[in-house]
Amino acid sequence: MSSITTTKTKTDELTHRLIMEIEKGLHAPGSKLRSVRDAAHKEAIGINTVLEAYNRLAARGYIEARPGSGFYIRHSPSTWAQAPAPHVSAAVDVVSLLREQLEQHYEVRVGDGRPPASWIEDSEIGRQLRRFRSGEPDDMGHGYGTPWGYQPLRETIARLLAERGIQSDSRQILLTQGANHALDLIIRHLLNPGDKVLVDSPGYYPLFGKLKLAKVEMLGIPRLEDGPDLSVLHELLKNERPRLFFTQSLAHNPTGNSISLPKAHKLLQMAAEHGCMVVEDDPFADLHPPTAPRLAALDQLERVIYVSSFSKTLSAGLRVGYVAGAPHLISDLCDLKMVTMVSTSDLVERVVFQMVSAGHYRRHVQKLKSRLQELHPWAVKSLRRAGATVRASDPGGYYIWLELPKGVDELGLIQKAATAGIFLAPGSVFYPTRTVHPPALRINVAYASDPKFLSFIEKALR
């Protein structure tokens, strides 16, 4: 038997004992735990051991950290109740961009949609993944599992949503194979051929492929630096009566900007007035403050369907995402999930749960935030020094939108870069229609300061 399953550390023992005390009511809700130093002295263990145990309790929702004050018992720790039993290539350029992000032929990957693999492999997450590969705990699932997804992970996600101001329980959360699977389920369930929907323009290109496949008509809402263009939104809501609006509020892909709070309020008012539901895709949720303006937090999952994922922040190889919404909608989506793919991977969901509940994920996200905040201003400065026009973007995301000068042959530039071993993401791919758009590039912050790329773009913009 693997030592991972048999050896309990002092951290494990302290964590387990504190959980038992909290669940038995020995610590009153809102009461303060001993300071890390006092607890270490009382238990005759190291300060780091206590801190690690407290971090695990915070990750599992039993306590909360208040900076400068200490750790406090949450007022209503969640319980893991049993999930209710359920009642029973349109665009070649889109496909080619997606294929390249998966197959990776190029040396310099400025057009990529995720951070470098080394950012994961040399991180806390990489170490934990190696632990799981070296020995599998006894309770790791090998069956299909519930079609709703691994229950403890759904409970953990409900707590994460609560931190973002979105109140929900596990019956309102369905685990999916990444955010793209969640979007696919929503499209299949709520839309029919010929229906009209609103999308960000530019926007998330894999979504456009799904909508084209479903024979749904897309109406683009121009993306401004503080969110969607509300004047265009109002006209299309009034005249076209679309069923859904798909949008990304924070660290928008591909422009990198985020919606303002006043605009978020107005958007929801317009949607309610015209009977349009909103699908909010939030793939970078954990890289932003809990108070960042989210439509789902303002709406509380009445008209907003909330989609997120661990793929962008944890690992693209761990395909775990989720969709949250009204209970009846999530139940219907669960039925559709069963019909189309039976279930998602219980094994992978357990791995993600272990990383989140043990506090490894929080530490990883903190490092990722620090890395982005350090690289983002440097990337913007480097690009502007090279002569590029860069739209304002959120340092909590992966992307920068580089606007090319008028008259630049976007496709020709992409092909020229490819011959030099540089993969670029053309701006035209991120528009829902093939009308003429200003030439642009989506730039991944992680690669934006690469000397080879900067030299190439500087010569191209002369």
Image (tube, rainbow, N blue to C red):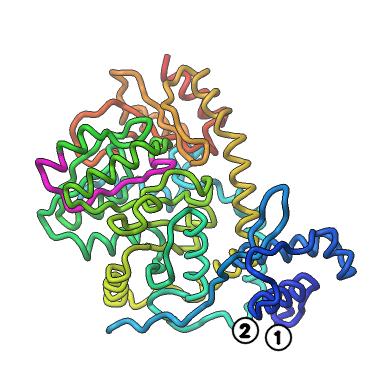
- For disc 2, the neighbor class at 10 Å (few under 14, some 14 to 19, many from 20) is few
Label placed on residue 1: 1
Q: Residue at x 63, y 59 (%)?
A: 64
Mark 2 belongs to which amino acid? Asp
Residue 72 at what x, y percent from top left? 67, 61
Q: Considering the numbered disc 2 on the image, is that residue within a helix, a strand or a loop?
A: loop
Seen in the picture, residue 297 relative to 266 is either above or below; the reply is: below
Front-most of 322 and 428? Answer: 322
Seen in the picture, residue 184 relative to 224 is either above or below; the reply is: below
The stretch drawn in magenta includes residue 151? no
Residue designated by label 2: 138
Image-based side of 169 in relation to 122, left or right: left
Mark 1 belongs to which amino acid? Met
Location of the N terminus by quadrant is bottom right
Q: Look at the image and give the residue range highlighted in magenta.
A: 236-253
Q: Residue at x 72, y 51 (%)?
A: 69
Front-most of 69 and 118? Answer: 69
